[in-house]
Image: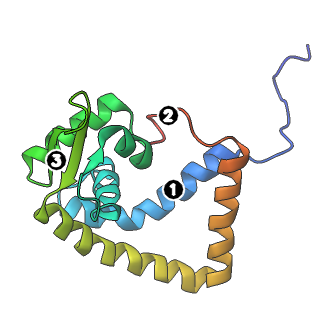
């Protein structure tokens, strides 16, 4: 009875390690997010909007979904709550009425600035512990793994 029972894997469980690393990093961020009433997903959306705040036409929902790593149905619920809370505005795209564009409100951008200071302080701490070179190496390795694996076509909602 050879089956799969007792199969020894030659490599460590990379997906699990990446999730553990994400959770370890997020442990430092979550208290600040919760203090401002934000979920992880809402923060990812706000961060994307903050990164593209200079784009006058707003950001299309499909692009937000890709960059914030959220599936369409989840994104829709997240945006509805954020709009209700005065963090974003949504409107139809002027060039294509089938598309929706999103912008952070002044209150949303203020929150991005406030939280980014806390998050950057944590990254500074991480950089001091690992060293600037090793953190840069980690970023480069992660970028390389993503590129090698062909990028990301589908989002695993559990991981996101």
Q: Residue at x 65, y 49 (%)?
A: 146
Q: CA distance from mark 1 to mark 3?
A: 24 Å
User: Which residue is at the far top?
Assistant: 1
**Which quadrant holds residue 34?**
bottom left
| Above or below: residue 153 compared with residue 49 | above
130 sits to left or right of 73: right
Tell me which label, 2 or 1, sits earlier in the chain: 1
Colouring: rainbow
**Which quadrant holds residue 50?**
bottom left
Residue 131 visible, this angle: no
Tell me which label, 2 or 3, sits earlier in the chain: 3
Secondary-structure class at tag 2: loop
Q: Residue at x 56, y 58 (%)?
A: 21
Determine which of the numbered discs, if any, sits on residue 82 in the image.
3
- Residue 53 lies, in percent from the top left, at 27, 63
- Residue 60 lies, in percent from the top left, at 30, 42
Q: Which residue lies under the disc numbered 2?
A: 156
153 sits to left or right of 11: left
Q: Which residue lies under the disc numbered 1?
A: 22
- Camera-near label (2 vs 3) is 3
- Marks 2/1 in contact by CB < 8 Å: the verdict is no
Q: Residue at x 32, y 72 (%)?
A: 116
127 sits to left or right of 69: right
Secondary-structure class at tag 3: helix
Q: CA distance from mark 2 to mark 1?
A: 14 Å
Determine crowd level at label 3: few under 14, some 14-19, many 20+ residues with C-alpha closer than 10 A: many
Q: CA distance from mark 2 to mark 3?
A: 22 Å
- Residue 46 lies, in percent from the top left, at 27, 56
| Above or below: residue 113 compared with residue 96 | below
Determine crowd level at label 1: few under 14, some 14-19, many 20+ residues with C-alpha closer than 10 A: few
| Above or below: residue 129 compared with residue 75 | below
Tell me which label, 1 or 3, sits earlier in the chain: 1
């Amino acid at each position: 009875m050879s089956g799969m029972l007792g199969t020894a894997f030659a490599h460590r469980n990379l997906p699990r390690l990446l999730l553990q690393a994400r959770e370890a990093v997020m442990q430092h961020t979550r208290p600040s997010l919760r203090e401002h009433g934000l979920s992880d997903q809402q923060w990812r959306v706000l961060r994307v909007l903050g990164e593209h705040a200079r784009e006058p036409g707003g950001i299309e929902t499909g692009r937000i979904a890709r960059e914030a790593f959220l599936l369409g149905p989840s994104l829709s619920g997240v945006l509805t709550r954020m709009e209700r809370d005065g963090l974003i505005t949504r409107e139809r795209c002027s060039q294509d009425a089938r598309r929706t564009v999103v912008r952070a409100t002044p209150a949303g951008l203020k929150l991005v600035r406030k939280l980014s200071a806390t998050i950057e302080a944590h990254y500074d701490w991480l950089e001091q512990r690992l060293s600037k070179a090793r953190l840069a190496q980690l970023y480069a390795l992660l970028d390389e793994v993503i590129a090698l694996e062909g990028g990301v076509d589908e989002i695993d909602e559990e991981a996101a």
